[in-house]
Image: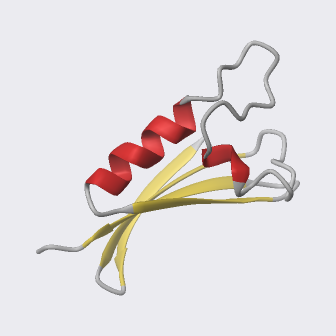
Amino acid sequence: MRVDSLIEANEKIIRISNNGPAIASELIESIFEPFVTTKELGTGIGLYVCKKIIEKNDGYMNCVSNENLTTFSIHFPDLS
């Protein structure tokens, strides 16, 4: 797992990456919806809750995934 942060275009960005299994492209948009999961014992609520907390703080979250790397990016306005 790799975590990094940067300021870019008046945004503070936190990126969390790992080299686990890729998330299918058809699932990328729906993984942030409640009760969507690919895990046998998953509830599908974790990413939804994270997204809502980030949005309540004027941010947004996205995901990019391929066979080599999956990266979740969390963006907040740079208020400094």
Identify which residue is drawn at 56% across, 47% down: 2
> On screen, 25 above or below 19?
below
Which image quarter holds the N terminus? top right
Instruction: Say which of 43 and 73 sits in front.
Output: 43
Question: Picture quarter containing residue 18?
Answer: top right
Instruction: Say which of 41 and 8 sits in front.
Output: 41
Question: Picture quarter containing residue 44?
Answer: top right
| Location of residue 79 in the rendering, given as x and y in whole percent from the top left corner | 14, 73
Q: Image check: 35 left or right of 39?
A: left
Q: Image check: 7 left or right of 44?
A: left
Q: How many marks?
A: 0
> On screen, 16 above or below 11?
above
Q: Image check: 10 left or right of 43?
A: left
Question: Picture quarter containing residue 77?
Answer: bottom left
In the rendered image, the residue lying farthest to the front is 34
Which image quarter holds the C terminus? bottom left
Identify which residue is drawn at 88% across, 54% down: 67
Identify which residue is drawn at 81% across, 31% down: 38
Identify which residue is drawn at 60% across, 36% down: 34
| Location of residue 33 in the rendering, given as x and y in whole percent from the top left corner | 62, 44
| Location of residue 60 in the rendering, given as x and y in whole percent from the top left corner | 43, 62
> On screen, 62 above or below 10?
above
Q: How is the image coloured?
A: secondary structure
Instruction: Say which of 23 and 68 sits in front.
Output: 23
In the rendered image, the residue lying farthest to the left is 80
In the rendered image, the residue lying farthest to the top is 41
Instruction: Say which of 68 and 30 sits in front.
Output: 30
